[in-house]
Amino acid sequence: MHIGLYFGSFNPIHIGHLIIAEHVIQHTDVDKLWFVVSPHNPLKEAHSLLNEYHRLHLVNLAIEDNHKFRASNVEFTLPKPSYTIDTLTYLTEKFPLERFSVILGSDSFQNIHRWKNYEQLVKQYSIIVYNRPGFEITETHGSDITVLNAPLLEVSSTYIRSQFRNKKSTRYLLPDNVREYIEANHYYQK
């Protein structure tokens, strides 16, 4: 089985993430897509993150009706900070019959040379890149790469968190059940 790994903070997961994930399922040979919730991205500040178990629960709420999607907490038990190559190595050892690909935006792919052991990553794993405006792929680093033109929304988790903080509507920006759960638990209010 071909499993696409969509790594992210998902702080919180929103409709843009879900659109990209569905596009990957529909336009590649990926059989299942795992949302790998990162407890701490080494390239991001940790203090702005909602607790990882809360973010995992929000992902589960968002994808509960899609059998091709799964929320993964694999990085919760791995050493911190989380590095993609370490997670891939662990998953490959744990699931030797599965084929894993990494899903990321072209903006992230442009920085892949800054990732831990990126040479090993691009040599051993295929990469599915969704284009982001202003971040054209000009260097593939010798990777097995698939580039997609997925529909993109100008929405970010940062914007959604600011909407919650400022008591503004987030309707249509994330699934209703996720929005309602965030509001009921007063996440992102401070």
Image (cartoon, helix red, strand yellow):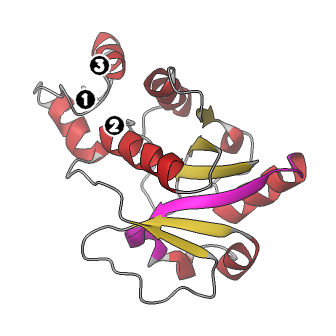
Residue segment shown in magenta: 95-109
Gap between marks 1 and 2 measured at Cα: 20 Å
In the depicted view, which residue is nearer to us: 175 or 40?
175
Q: Earlier in the sequence, mark 1 or mark 3?
A: 3
Picture residue at 18% right of the left edge, 28% below the top:
170
Q: Left or right of 10: which side holds 180?
A: left
Residue marked by disc 1: 190
Q: Secondary structure at mark 3?
A: helix
Q: Residue at point 35% right, 64% down?
A: 149
Residue indicated by mark 3: 176
Mark on residue 48? none
Q: Against 136, is 173 above or below?
A: above
Disc 1/disc 3 C-alpha distance (Å): 21 Å
| Dot 3 amino acid type | Asp
Q: Nearer the viewer, mark 1 or mark 2?
A: 2
Viewer-side residue, 67 vs 111: 67
Residue 71 % position (x, y) = 59, 33
Q: Position of residue 141 (x, y in %)?
A: 58, 87
Instruction: Answer above or below: position of 26 versus 177.
Output: below
Residue highlighted by disc 2: 14
Residue type at mark 1 is Lys
CA neighbours of label 1 inside 10 A, class few (<14), some (14 to 19), many (20+): few
Q: Give the Cα distance between marks 3 and 2.
A: 10 Å
How many circles with numbers are drawn on the protein? 3
The answer, for residue 181, to whether it is visible in the render is yes
Residue 175: x and y, percent? 32, 25
